[in-house]
Amino acid sequence: MANELMEMNKQEVMSRDDAEHTRTQKLYTPATDIHETQEQLTLLADMPGVKQDGVEITLEQNILTIYGHLDAPEFPGYNLTYAEYGMGGYRRVFALSNEIDRDGIQASVKNGVLKLILPKSKRAMPRKISVQAE
Amino acid sequence: MLFQRLAGNDLFSSLREMQRLQDSLNRVLSSAPNHSAEYPLVNVWTSENGAIVRAEVPGIAPEDVDISLVHDTLTIRGSRKPEELKEGEARYRHERGFGGFTRSLQLPFGVEGDKVEAKFASGVLQITLPRAEAEKPRRISVVSES
């Protein structure tokens, strides 16, 4: 698989809610991987250009929203003469089950990839029930 | 399911998704070069003094990218490693691509090869290519003969 060409088309967010954005930036849907173990979910989202302080994560009820803001690059004296990718921020919304331990959520950004660790709450973890012989 | 993608439920994004699938299928079925198979995508800024090329390569470490310049052709080579699953981990959603890539760009002018700079920040590669001194536009003053 190592020689397989990578592909990535940016998809612009087609917003379902009618909320107006206060920034004029375009928003794109970040490509996301989700891995699951018995203890936690790991979410990886590609957000090139977004720094640690540009990430905003909100959890309202069970709706997890990830935003990535970034400043559009500007080069004084230069003109953008050829553009293949759109520039803007990122936004994606997930519905979480109630099984996530909200206080334990960890977020980090490395090389433009957001990593979110969502630990499952103790209640949701599988429990072993021992059967006692009478 | 613990997760559900809310944003993807409306008709238009479903259509988009279908379009995307169709694009991927076309790419697999035809060996002809396809624009969207290019990676990484680049944006280019130019001025009289040179060009700035930016490419989005999230999740790739700077040491995994190789940049070379031959005459006026810039080549970006690299690879993104697949995310290894840990013991007992299941892949739930897999949208991020991985693998090797090569991208070449021909610039509209000769480049001062020694002065090319490449920076890497937050998954964006930025290459500054100064135009060769000999190729810079020159102003020619007109002297009037009286």
Image: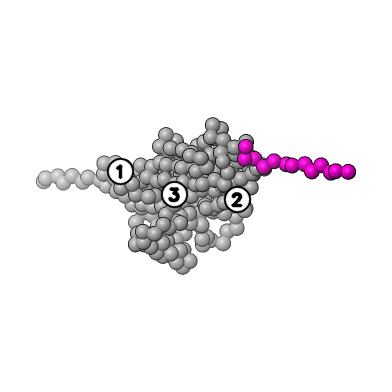
| Residues at marks 2 and 3, CA–CA distance in whole angstroms | 19 Å
- Within the image, what quadrant is residue A75 found in? top right
Q: Are the residues at dot 2 and dot 3 in contact (C-beta closer than 8 Å)?
A: no
Q: How far from the left and from the top, in percent, is residue A6?
A: 39, 49
As shown in the figure, which amino acid type bears the numbered disc 3?
A: Tyr
Magenta extent = B134-146
In this view of the protein, which residue sits in the foreground, B90 or B100? B100
Secondary-structure class at tag 1: loop
Q: Which residue is the site of mark 3? A: B39
Q: Viewed as shown, does residue A74 lie left or right of A94?
A: right
Q: How far from the left and from the top, in percent, is residue B73?
A: 50, 43
Secondary-structure class at tag 2: strand
Tag 1 or tag 3, which sits nearer the N-term? Answer: 3
In this view of the protein, which residue sits in the foreground, A89 or B133? B133
As shown in the figure, which amino acid type bears the numbered disc 2?
A: Thr
As shown in the figure, which amino acid type bears the numbered disc 1?
A: Leu
Q: How far from the left and from the top, in percent, is residue A119?
A: 37, 43
Residue A108's tag is none
Residue at position x 42%, y 42% in the image: B77
> Extreme left residue here?
A134
Task: Specify the subunit that label 2 lies on.
Answer: A
Q: Which residue is the site of mark 2? A: A81
Secondary-structure class at tag 3: loop
Q: Are the residues at dot 3 and dot 1 in contact (C-beta closer than 8 Å)?
A: no
Residue at position x 40%, y 46% in the image: B101
Residue at position x 60%, y 50% in the image: A81
Task: Specify the subunit that label 3 lies on.
Answer: B
Q: Which residue is the site of mark 1? A: B85
